[in-house]
Amino acid sequence: MQWQCPTICICFPCPLQGKSKLSTHATFLLVCRTSFLSDFTLNAIYLLPTTQQARRRSYIHRHCWLVSRNPGSLANIIIMGSSSAAVVLLLLAAVFRARPVEALAANWGTRARHPLPGDITVRLLKDNGFDKAKLFEADPAALQALGHSGIQVMLGLPNELLASVAGNVAAAEQWVQQNVSNYVSKYGVDIRYVAVGNEPFLKSYKGMFEAATLPAVQNVQAALVKAGLARQVRITVPLNADVYESLDGRPSSGDFRPDITTLMTNLVRFLLDSGGVLAINIYPFLSLDADANFPRDYAYFPAPGAPPSQASVQDGNVLYTNVFDANYDTLIAALEKHGLGNITVVVGEIGWPTDGDANANVASAQRFNQGLFDRIVAGKGTPRRPQMPDVYVFALLDEDNKSVDPGNFERHWGVFNYDGSPKYPLSLASGRAIVPAKGVKYLSKQWCVLRSDASPTDPAVVGAIGYACQFADCTSLSPGSSCGSLDVRGNISYAFNQFFQSANQQKGSCAFNNLAVITTTDPSQGTCRFRIEIDPGRRDRTHGNSDSAAARAAAAWGAVVLLALLAIVAV
Ligand SMILES: *[C@@H]1O[C@H](CO)[C@@H](O)[C@H](O)[C@H]1NC(C)=O
Ligand SMILES: *[C@@H]1O[C@H](CO)[C@@H](O)[C@H](O)[C@H]1NC(C)=O
Ligand SMILES: *[C@@H]1O[C@H](CO)[C@@H](O)[C@H](O)[C@H]1NC(C)=O
């Protein structure tokens, strides 16, 4: 039997257990999807001795997971499972089909002043069809919440650690031990990739991380081998699209940036040889924002049936109708030019912000992301790579504590608001709409505003706003943003409220030299929302992690039982 490394596997208990002759064993079904967007098929029957230990969910999960990742052990399963009941079910494997899922992937950044709790975020991911998440660092709360969730994780090793990990195998081993092995074995986190560095070759870093990146990749790989994890955890390096270029604008002319050509070929060769992938971050928003003459419609995916953008690029007999396809294929052409065309290239980041810039708004973000989601759901890739790769949407949530060096839009990339509510409607497979986070607890329904009898020209106002906006996020006040057209009283109030919420509405955080007062009337107006912060102390403790997996398993099991009955009738 030919066994292909599966993209995703689900393991769930067989309801026949106890009734079969194999009552000393618990029976589990391993249902896998072997390629991106294919249906789930029953891949194996797995038997575990019904000892005390085997009843534990973590034990079962780990074993099923090892089986799904380790081709060699399949032989064992077949031998173990060759009872008549199991054989019948194995025969059914050929016809068994379960409901496909969207297979979406998202970047889960945690630089928020009041992060959405991990369990609520994991449920948000699952409820919306995300089965892969990328973390920029080993955030303990996020990783613990991802344990046993069925979500595959790409875990980032930040640029700041590259030099130490590159200089010293022991440092790499320590990082892997503390941040990978620990979460895999203790919490059951399904870590699939370590992303070494984040856009380390970005031009604006002026070469700062270039020397350390490849040695760091090699040391992390060696550490994964040593930890016995190299089969299930692969390496990637997320790169910015400025590592390649096309001098004449045609994707087929793509090549690496001249100053890093050798580095790129060595890096990709190593990734290929060690079973890793390349991750590329592509930002049509940034292309549009940086160039006033950028053809607007070329930044978006064309609407079905719409005429191609005037700016479409003819490349041989291929017409590139949008910048994503052209950009991705420029990289593929560069890789092919250097004999590296076999590397898998995932999209590590792509998205559109909603605030903090004239080009960042809900309508544009919705247009871009709906086009993107439609392509992901359809599995439609680019002219050079017809199958859509894994695409990690940037981002799941807004992060109000990120650096605004790239621009005020940097804190507003979320498809969801800070509290997990959708910013705009998006439809997933078969028109299903995205749904909000469940179980979020908020602080009291009160806001801090400028007193009606205080003057906006009071000499203390400037200092007060400066202070508020130093410790809270005021980027929505910037020109062209959601609160950019507030009058002067409105924007003072906005700044006061942001500070008050950031400070958990603590006593004294709405003072501002007696310029401010607490109100229970929502001061929001037009597009400008005055927020109520998430309550960091009082939150829903229910763990929703397994709800949808269980529902899916139940549905899938229904199909198996039905097929079994049909098979019996047919015989
Ligand atoms: C684990 O990751 C965190 C976050 O990136 C980092 O601060 C910590 O130093 C890492 N542990 C080791 C041993 O490197
Ligand atoms: C790409 O992979 C295929 C099959 O795995 C192999 O036959 C081919 O030689 C590889 N090409 C290169 C350029 O490595
Ligand atoms: C506040 O509003 C005034 C008047 O509309 C405007 O001139 C000023 O730039 C705004 N301040 C901020 C921080 O946005």
Image (cartoon, rainbow, N blue to C red):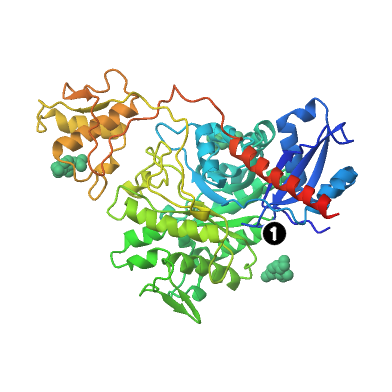
Residue 173 found in image quarter: top right
Which amino acid is tagged 1?
Asp
Residue 312 found in image quarter: bottom left
- Residue that extends furthest to the front in the rendered view of this protein: 569
Q: Give the image location of residue 220, x and y in percent.
A: 64, 46
Q: Indicate which quadrant contains ligand 1.
A: top right
| Vertical order, 254 against 211 (above or below) | below
Counting labels gives: 1
Q: In this view, does 67 lie to the left or right of 175?
A: right
Q: Give the image location of residue 323, x and y in percent.
A: 43, 66
Q: Is residue 366 left or right of residue 131?
A: left
Residue displayed at 40% across by 58% down: 368
Residue displayed at 23% across by 28% down: 521
Q: Give the image location of residue 177, x and y in percent.
A: 66, 36
**What residue is shown with label 1?**
273
Q: Is residue 467 left or right of residue 367?
A: left
Q: Give the image location of residue 483, x and y in percent.
A: 24, 43
Q: Quadrant of the C terminus?
A: bottom right
| Vertical order, 138 against 242 (above or below) | above
- Residue that extends furthest to the bottom in the rendered view of this protein: 316
Classify 10 Å Cα crowding around label 1: few (below 14), some (14-19), many (20 and above): few
Q: Is residue 429 visible?
A: yes
Instruction: Please name whichever residue, 137 or 148, is drawn nearer the observer in this view of the structure.
Output: 148
| Vertical order, 549 against 71 (above or below) | above
